[in-house]
Amino acid sequence: MSKKKSETTLMDNNSFTVELEKHLRRELGTSPKRATAHDWWQALSLTLRDINLDQLQQSGLDENQEERHVCYLSMEFLMGRLLGDALMNLGLYETAATLLQSYGVRLSDVLDQERDMSLGNGGLGRLAACFMDSLANRNIPATGYGINYRYGLFRQVFVDGYQKEKPDVWREFGSPWETCRPSETVEIGLFGHMEMDHDGNNRWVPSKKLFGVPWDITIPSFGGQYVNRLRLWESLVGAYPIDLDKYNQGEYLEACRNLVDGDTISGVLYPEDSTPQGKDLRLIQQYFFTACSLKDIIRQHKQRGLPMGSLAKHYALQLNDTHPAIAIPELMRLLMDEEGMVWNQAWAITQEMCHYTNHTLLPEALEKWSASLLGRILPRHLQIIEMINYVFLNGEAKEQWGDNLEIIQKVSIFEELDNGDRMIRMANLSVIGSRRVNGVAALHSGLVKANLFPEFDALYPGKLVNVTNGVTPRRWLAHCNPGLARLLDRNIGTDWRTDLDQLEKLTPLAESPDFLDAFANVRFKNKERLARLIEKECKVTVNPNALFDVQIKRLHEYKRQQLNLLHIISLYHEMLDNPDADHTPRVFVFGAKAAPGYVLAKQIILAINKIAQVINNDRRLDDRLKVVFLPDYRVSLAEQIIPAADLSEQISTAGFEASGTGNMKLGLNGALTIGTLDGANVEIAEAVGDDNIFIFGKTVDEIAALQQQGYNPYHYYESNPVLKRAIDSLMNGSFCQHKPDLLKPVAEDLMHRDQFMALADFESYREAQQKVSETFRKPRLWWRKAVLNTARLGGFSSDRSIADYAEKVWGE
Ligand code: Z16
């Protein structure tokens, strides 16, 4: 391949056809004439994977020897589908469409064959995927390290309005995107005990061995020139996991035990978003992928002939939340026990290599492991953590705070329980062991400093920083919204894909009626497309001229889907009271999965579904109000909803949503935001201007003050007749005549507990929603605001986030 040719596309049409047909014949044993849509999907994916693998050899590996390699450690990578994005990145979309057409096959049908790669829960996992994309686009040599779960996040179906979980069978017969690298298998230990060797040193003798087999996925930049790698570990117990002694004694089931155990570790993703469960299998998963990744890094470093002392100079570890925080004691163990370093040298390297991203302030979401549990699985690591804590408390901490017991107890890695056990605070360990700690939005990072880690901020000035999240414009604009992409190309050129600040050029066009019409036209087509999907999935007919009001995110009390629901009920009542008034037609769209054990979240799903059923079938409304809950919300579904959203619901209680990233995706595609001053909403409001966003609700300070004085939701219920009527209708069975008590738990929680103060923000929310309705009735005004949203959100590209990490976190 010549350099010149590779500047436009990496492969010409003829070679592409040849490669594709070769895969059809040799990998799938079929031919273009007989191939099914699924065969075409596999063959196309393999062809693109090959192009990426060729480029991978030329990127990161030989060049950039001097540049620091970024290792992004994450339990979750929510990649979604890969083919459409890859075709776009490699400039082969049209080529593929035309070629398939010549065989009478539609590319869209082929793309639909792909199952989402749902190896993540929500924001944190999708952020990791966007960051992989942006690292490649910034030409930063990087590897994403994670787990090759056999089953990703459960598939969601509704039965009588209840959420039911089904297994996510995403790669039953392998995935064309994954390449196994058995020769780079690593071995790790678990359990066992400590022994004293003849030099008086402690030695860990693990009683279990576990193998990690790497599966690689290529991550191309836009244009395909630069390629990085995502490396996901699969667990295996032993190269030959059948116990032959037992086998020979006829104990076949026992003989296969290791097979089962090996499969279990990387078997399934834990489905909790921001509520860790503290189960030992989860800790083993965390250690498994972290230890495999560190072994892999050290092996590469040695292969390059570099001395261990320079490890931190060549590698930066980014810990995505505390899930991989066991990397800190594991790195210490490797450097001391395996490489023979003394404590201080190992600690200096560890502290220079590690960087930790915090994604939440919710106390229940901060990971803590029981010391006895951790000590049973990883005895050596417990010792090292104790030593880290000892050195810290008797050194830096003592110097700073003397004998101030209250502070010492707060900054200690260990929390002493009344029952005698101790809990290991993984966040404290991560802050102490890292060079930088970052929050994910300006407001959040401020709260991390002021409320979560004020002592650490005082002790380590400059360690705590902010890097505001971002989203990749390749997937979340160019690929998911081709209509808007074409409109942008015609009006501001094509560079926005890799330089999202170019969107600023749209600002003057917001004053052009022709442009506004064209913009609205693109949006109308997207809404028609979503309407068809809603018809198919929910059997509900919606009017594409209505306002599409969208809330898509995990179901969580703090995200307040309940607040949205209360507003919907109040609109319903208003329409029934004044059937002849000129109501703005609305379609409410929900997408959300609840953690299987989160009872209240599941009840909220049930409530939305039941209310939807009543409203959608009420003839009196003249189709002016519809509510749909699209099942199985996931990346590929988000790609269809987002380009069609008019209003983006970002209504969390101020101070609880660390950043949010859906807010960025929706705004970029031209939705207006209705939101609280929480997470990245604050920066979004600054960027788009107060006139182009609907802000409501209590601020962080007001919420804190209310909490302080003792929050009483019943007071709001009693004193607001609209609110009272909405909650009463949940209580009295208006939405489920034959089971009148069904939605009571949701109503009762709101009236008597309401942990996230939905009732306190209800009136302000309703007023903001009234402004939304009024504005939507003036299309010119509405679309002008929408265009300005797109124009001013360029700063929320994950390319910018990665540039910030390079500068503020991994750099000097
Ligand atoms: C998660 O997705 C997030 C936080 C967390 O503690 C655990 C999980 Cl699985 C989310 C935040 O809730 C969200 O505000 C943020 O935008 C996202 O992480 C990425 O930073």
Image (tube, grey):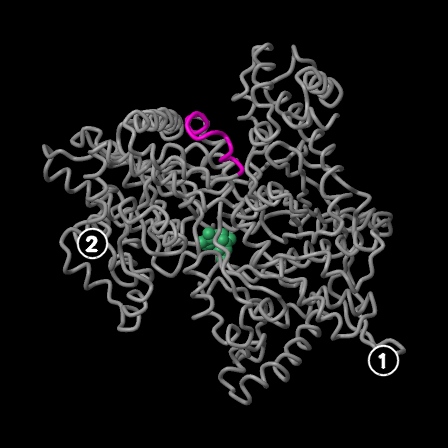
Range covered by the magenta-colored residues: 486-498
- Spatial separation of the CA atoms under disc 2 and disc 1: 69 Å
**Which one is earlier in the sequence, the residue at label 2 or at label 1?**
1
Queried on whether the Cβ of the residue with tag 1 lies below 8 angstroms from ligand 1, the answer reads: no
For this view, does 124 lie left or right of residue 47? Answer: left
Residue appearing at x 30%, y 65% in the figure: 703
Q: Which residue corresponds to the image point at 21% horizontal and 63% vertical from the top-left?
A: 714
In this picture, is 508 found above or below 77? above
Q: Is residue 397 above or below residue 522?
A: below
Residue named by callout 2: 763
Q: Are marks 2 and 1 in contact (CB under 8 Å)?
A: no
| 604, above or below 109, in the image | below
User: Does the rendering let one see residue 289?
Assistant: yes
Give the left or right position of residue 667, taking residue 706 as reference.
right
Residue 146 pos. (x, y %): 65, 49
Foreground residue among 497 and 93:
497
